[in-house]
Image: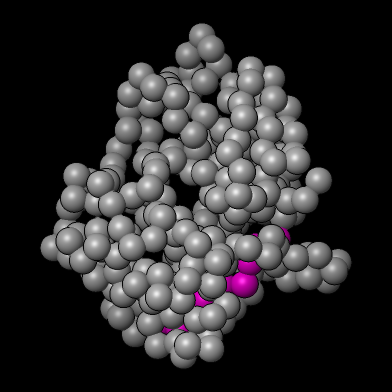
């Protein structure tokens, strides 16, 4: 197991990530064991089967799956066992007169899409990215929520209510800036303790019990994980930023 630097900083202050959120990620240890990433999707299928058997509440699969691969049937079977949320990217993005991003969807592929409980877009405008979280966009002509908002709804067990000026998520209220972005300073939010793919595949029943009734984000946190600037000369892995956004939206008021 490992703890990211953001989690370590907040732990010193006596705080922690939302208790219902877990993170399973590709690590350097996994790459040494399973081979170069991207792995066969059969490995992800095994991880998800193990999490479903452990009683996880839902899965947020933080990988692009637009390209078809040989093990898609295995992954689809695993995703269908548990409420699973997949990400879509946006292409040809422009800002519309309503302030929202408008674009076309990229992924998931037709073998995996039917297995999903829902889809959320991942795309963040650079301006004000530390202090705002994308909430909704126009994708292929219809309104689609962001994956971070879908994950937060799973975490707090409440549906979001969005008006032109406000996002309501359970007891929390967020000001919307007219561009489908919630004002929430997420850069210092804690990242949950991470678990490698191998630890889940090989884990004992006692180890896997920690995932019972948890929302599990499956992502990437190896040394070659892409990083983004988050201000003040700092960079963070992209999946850590996603987790911070989810934690910010789901934090107790």
Q: Is residue 96 magenta?
A: no
Q: Which residues are magenta?
A: 190-199
Q: Position of residue 67 (x, y in %)?
A: 21, 50
Q: Nearer the viewer, residue 218 or 132?
A: 218
Q: Position of residue 48 (x, y in %)?
A: 37, 69
Residue 131 visible in rendering? no
Q: Residue at x 56, y 65 (%)?
A: 214
Horizontal side of 8 relative to 201 (left or right) equals right
Q: Position of residue 236 (x, y in %)?
A: 60, 56
Quarter of the rendering occupied by the N terminus: bottom right
Q: Residue at x 68, y 65 (%)?
A: 19
Q: Residue at x 68, y 49 (%)?
A: 250
Q: Nearer the viewer, residue 135 or 37?
A: 135
- 250 lies above or below 40: above
Horizontal side of 246 relative to 51 (left or right) equals right
- 69 lies above or below 97: below
Q: Is residue 192 magenta?
A: yes
- 67 lies above or below 135: below
Residue 253 visible in rendering? yes
Outermost residue toward the left in this view? 70
Place residue 141 in its image quadrant: top left
């Amino acid at each position: 197991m490992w703890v990211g630097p953001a989690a370590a900083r907040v732990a010193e202050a006596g705080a922690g990530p939302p208790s219902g959120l877990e993170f399973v990620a590709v690590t350097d240890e996994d790459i040494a064991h399973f081979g170069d990433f991207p792995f066969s999707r059969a490995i992800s299928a095994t991880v998800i089967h193990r999490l479903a058997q452990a009683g996880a509440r839902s899965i947020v699969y933080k990988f692009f799956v637009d390209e078809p691969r040989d093990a898609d049937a295995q992954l689809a079977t695993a995703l269908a066992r548990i409420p699973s949320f997949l990400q879509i990217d946006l292409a040809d993005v422009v800002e519309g007169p309503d302030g929202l991003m408008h674009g076309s969807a990229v992924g998931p592929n037709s073998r995996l899409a039917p297995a999903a409980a829902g889809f959320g877009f991942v795309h963040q405008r650079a301006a004000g990215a530390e202090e705002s979280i994308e909430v909704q966009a126009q994708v292929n002509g219809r309104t689609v929520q962001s994956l971070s908002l879908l994950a937060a709804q799973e975490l707090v067990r409440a549906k979001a209510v969005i008006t032109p000026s406000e996002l309501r998520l359970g007891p929390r209220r967020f000001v919307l800036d007219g561009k489908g972005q919630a004002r929430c300073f997420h850069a210092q939010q804690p990242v949950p303790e991470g678990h490698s793919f191998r630890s889940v595949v090989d884990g004992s029943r006692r180890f896997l019990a920690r995932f019972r009734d948890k929302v599990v984000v499956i992502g990437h946190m190896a040394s070659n994980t892409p990083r983004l600037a988050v201000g003040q000369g700092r960079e963070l892995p992209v999946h850590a930023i996603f987790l911070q956004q989810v934690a910010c939206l789901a934090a107790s008021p």
